[in-house]
Image (tube, grey):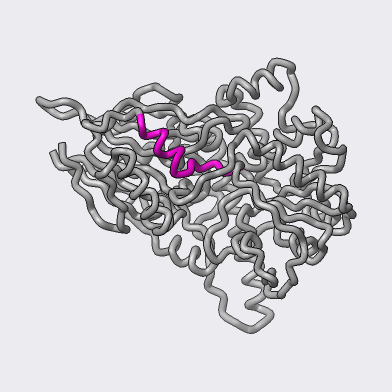
Amino acid sequence: MAITLSSLGAAQEVTGSKHLLEVDGTRLLFDCGAFQGKREEADKKNRDFHMDGSGLASVVLTHAHYDHCGLLPVLGKDGYRGNIYATPATRDLAAIIMMDSAKIQARDAEYLRKQAVKQGKVFSWEPLFVERDVTSVVEQFVTLSYRRTLPIAEGVEIAFYDAGHILGSAVALVSIKRKGGPELRVGFTGDLGRKHKAIIRDPEAIPDVDYLIVESTYGDRLHESSEDAAERLASVVNATAERGGKIVIPAFAIERTQEIVYLLHLLADRKRIPELPIFVDSPMATNATSIFQVHPECYDEETNRAFVVHHKNPFGFNSLRYVASVAESKELNALKGPAIIISADGMCEAGRIQHHLIHTVGDPRNTILVVGYMAENTLGRKIADREPEVRIFGDLFHLKAHVEEIHAFSAHADYREIGEYLAPLDKKRLKRIFMVHGEPAAQKALKSYLAGQGFPQVEIVAYGKRYELEP
């Protein structure tokens, strides 16, 4: 039996996860994510992705982040008509993320077309996919709850275990049946979460495996304790409110926004922060929050005790307002502090957050609160690095606002948490660990750390290289 693994994305980089497992010629794709980063580079990489969709047997989606699901409509355009396996919550979140991307691309195309006409230029840019492509691919989803087993190809089964990363996220366990021999197990962590996160459950242990594909985003860092997140958030809110400033939080619309809203609700209930207006200015975050409300089966016990048992909405309270229209969003630019504005994009590369930053960065009373990973060369990374000037929409702005970071909000496990997750696995059975979804420095550090924890067989996956998995 010939079994190989190769990566078509997120190999020695953090975004664009696409990993191909081939079992005697049967091709199985795990995640089909879009590359995110600098706009021109991201657009080129995403347009360069094409594969014969008709040659795939199945697609498995570990979770709904855009860098894991964003090119599924392109795969459909390339001829894939098979099943896409995911948890119910992942299907619902992926649908709104992909549709939101289609709408943004359509708006961008219309804007660029008008600009080209004004300048007398030929316009040729087209969206990667449109809304009907999303509708088609969503119809291909087949949902599977945690800890249930389902055949996805001849002799191949999958089961999902809670990855504790975002709502519905999963570690995929692949079981390959071999004639006359024991089954071969391959685990894909997708993005691995952390213990004690708000709302969702802790990462769930998986059965022993022969091979494991593991993410490495924070392979060279230790996070603050998740339990300290509320304390740090209260400190930032109180300090900024005393200055009369605004707190602007660039946050991904999925998970991070809901987690911050949840904690602000707890802090307000417990009188830990003053009553001040809180705005969620992201249409996708608003839609995603509605998905969170209909999937309480993914909540942890603390969330159930604090809200569900008492019939309270963890994502809605008196001080909170969800901003829908562009006109309402623009009104926030004239808002005087103290106030909190949570807006997307999480890396500040697009969306309404850029407009809020224009009206925030130059005032020392304000705070920009960084609560997630900022990729290299993004506006978010430049703000997090406290560069004295930042460029937004082509104009330079002096960065005078306070910049605070709370790493406890990270949804990715750090190197110690990855080690703790791997520790129960049978080291005698585990032949090799393949490392993906990380920048080179982080992967090198994590490989060294895991060797010290008794996992010497760690391979940093190279883009396009094919690795044989020995039975």
Q: Is residue 220 above or below residue 226?
A: below
Res. 189 visible in picture? yes
Image check: 322 left or right of 186? right
Q: Is residue 262 above or below residue 366?
A: above
Q: Return the residue found at the far front.
A: 452
Q: Return the residue found at the far bottom.
A: 120
Res. 154 visible in picture? no
Magenta range is: 409-423
- Does 421 lie within the magenta span? yes
The part of the image, by quadrant, that contains residue 317 is top right
Image check: 25 left or right of 391? left
Q: Return the residue found at the far left.
A: 180
Q: Position of residue 200 (x, y in %)?
A: 57, 29
Q: Position of residue 427 (x, y in %)?
A: 26, 32
Q: Residue at horizontal 45%, vertical 40%?
A: 416
Q: How many discs mark residues in the rendered view?
A: 0
Q: Nearer the viewer, residue 383 or 67?
A: 383
Quadrant where the C terminus is found in the figure:
top left
The part of the image, by quadrant, that contains residue 231 is top right
Q: Main secondary structure of the magenta part?
A: helix
Quadrant where the N terminus is found in the figure:
top left
